[in-house]
Image (cartoon, helix red, strand yellow):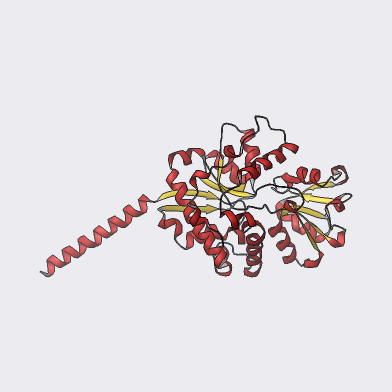
Amino acid sequence: MIALALRLGRIGVFAASVLTAASASAQTPIKFSLDFKFEGPAAPFVVAIDKGYFKAEGLDVTIDTASGSLEPINRVASGTYDMGFGDINSLIKFRDANPGTPIKAVFMVYNKPPFSIVGRKSRGVLAPKDLEGKKLGAPPADGAYAQWPIFVRAKSMDASKVTIVSVGVPVREPMLASGEVDAITGFSFSSYINLKDRGVPADDITVLLMADHGVNLYGNAIMVNPKFAAEKPEAVKAFLRAFVKGLHETVKNPAGSVESVLKRNDVAKKDVELERLQLALKDNILTSEVKKNGYGDVDMERLEKSLDQIALTYTFKNVKPKGADVFDHSFLPPAAERKAP
C-alpha cells in the first residue's frame, strides 16, 4: 500500500508538472515597446505585469524601453515588436510615407497630448510670442517638436525669429537649466519634472501645453503590427483588457503603482516619478472626454479634425487618411470595463 501511494504521488507530481509546462507553453508571447524609459507614466503597463493581469489573460508580455515616440513605430512596423506605445500623429505620417505598412492604433492612452514648449521665466519666456528672438532646444525625433509647425501657425508666430538648436534628448533639460537655450520642446510631465529635479525653481518654469494653444491633436496610443493583429486578434484584445486593469489600479493607487516603475529603473526617485505620473493622469489621461466616454476610445469627429490640422503643415504624399484608417475600435474591451472615475 505504501509503495502504491508513493507511485501515485509521483504520478500526481508528474501530471502537475506537465500541466504547468503546458500552461506556460500555451501563453501567447507579446513583445511590447514603450516610447521612452521606465518612468512614472509607464506604470499601467508594468503594473499589469506585476499584478499578473497579462498572465491571467494567457499572455507572456515583455516590455522594453525606447528612445522616443518614433522608435516604437519603427519597431512595430518591422515586426520585431508585436505592439507598442507611441504618438498617433507620428504614426499617421509614418503610414503616409510607408503605405505598405498599415499600422493602426487600437487604444488611446493620452487623450490630451503632453506636447509642450517648456521655458524659463528668467529668460523671458512666459507666452508663445516670447519665443521670437530666443533659442529653442529641440531633439529632431521629439514628438513635441514634430508639432512645432502647427503650434507656430496656431499662434501666428514668426518662426524665422526663433533659433532652433538641435539637441539630444539626454542634454535637453540640462541645456535649459544652464541657460544655453531659452526653452525646449518636450512632454510636459517629463521636462517640467526633470528641470525641477535639476534644481530649477518651479516658479521659474513656464509650461506651454500645445493643446491649450491651438494644437488640437490626440497623443500617445497603443498600436499593433497588422500581421500580428490579423493572426492573433484575441491576443490583442486580451492585452488591452489586462492593460485597462493596470490603468484602473494605477489611477486608484498611484503611489503603490509607481513602485513597479522603480524596480525597473535603478536611478529613478519615487517622489519624482510619482509626481510625473500624477501630472500625466491629471493632464493627459483623465480628461473630461475620458470621464464621459471611458478609457481608450477616440471621438472620430475630433480625430478627423486633427487630421485636417496635420494637413495644414504636412503635405500628404498619398490621399489624406480617414480616422478609421488609423484607429481601430474593434479590439477595445466593453465600455463598462473602460469606465473612468
Residue 230 at x, y percent in the picture = 46, 38
Residue placed farthest to the left in the image? 1
Residue 267 at x, y percent in the picture = 63, 64
Q: Residue at x 63, y 43 (%)?
A: 301
> Is residue 39 in view from this perspective?
no
Residue 307 at x, y percent in the picture = 67, 39
Number of callouts: 0
Q: Quadrant of the C terminus?
A: bottom right
> Is residue 114 in view from this perspective?
yes
In the displayed structure, 268 sits above or below 159; it is below
Residue placed farthest to the top in the image? 318
* Left or right: residue 304 compared with residue 228: right
Q: Nearer the viewer, residue 75 or 305?
A: 305
Q: Nearer the viewer, residue 52 or 314?
A: 314
Q: Quadrant of the N terminus?
A: bottom left
Q: Residue at x 62, y 41 (%)?
A: 91
Residue 93 at x, y percent in the picture = 66, 38
Q: Residue at x 56, y 59 (%)?
A: 340
* Left or right: residue 151 compared with residue 102: right
Q: Nearer the viewer, residue 336 or 140?
A: 336
